[in-house]
Amino acid sequence: MAIAPGPHNLDAIRPILGPKGDALLKKVTPDFYETLGKDVPDFQGHILIQHFEFSDPWPTWEVHPVGDEFVYLISGDVDFVLWENGREKTVRVNEPGSYVMVPMNTWHTARPRNKTTMLFVTPGEGTLNAEKPQ
């Protein structure tokens, strides 16, 4: 069955693009990430599209081992921090419409300078989070 074309609200329903170009629409619930693995086992070949508004530094670092991540600035001012060669590389993103490409296997975090909204297009398979880059 084809999915409903919309309109949809990204705060309520997130699209997950499949490896064959198909899409799954998943309702955002408090256990969204916990149930994601049940709905899309292993997340192999899938891309999650979501956006977040944040004012505080991320509490953890993350890494995506199977693909590059596209991160687009909708509004705000943020230092996007990449872990390269054993040290932090900061990329300031402060012009709406600009974006960061996070290379595959690169630990990253974000430290906003003020309230920031970004769109994330993430190859989710194998994503890891940690207090510090590993």
Image: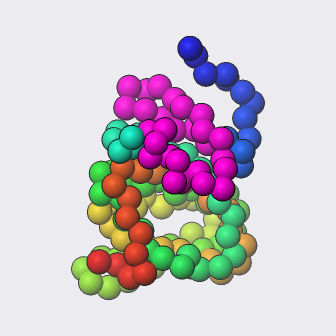
Looking at the image, can residue 91 be seen?
no
- Which residue range is magenta in the image? 14-40
Q: How far across and down, in percent of the image, does residue 25 sit?
A: 60, 34
**Residue 126 locus on image (x, y percent):** 33, 55
53 sits to left or right of 122: right
Kindly tell me whether residue 53 is visible in this rendering: yes
Tell me the quarter of the image containing the C terminus: bottom left
Please say if 24 is above or below 44.
Answer: above
Count of labels in the image = 0
Q: Is residue 10 left or right of residue 130?
A: right
Judged from this view, the residue extending furthest toward the top is 1
Residue furthest to the bottom: 87
- Image position, residue 114 (x, y; %): 71, 78
Residue 24 lies in the magenta stretch: yes
**Residue drawn at the location 62% of the way across and 70% of the way down:** 94
Q: Is residue 13 above or below residue 112?
A: above
Q: Position of residue 35 (x, y in %)?
A: 52, 47
Give left or right: position of 31 versus 114: left
Q: Is residue 122 left or right of residue 133?
A: right
Q: Tell me what residue is drawn at x 29 percent, y 63 percent.
A: 105
Residue found 72% across the figure and 73% down from its top: 115
Report the front residue among 86 and 39.
39
Q: Is residue 99 magenta?
A: no
Name the residue: 36% across, 71% down. 107
Q: Quadrant of the N terminus?
A: top right
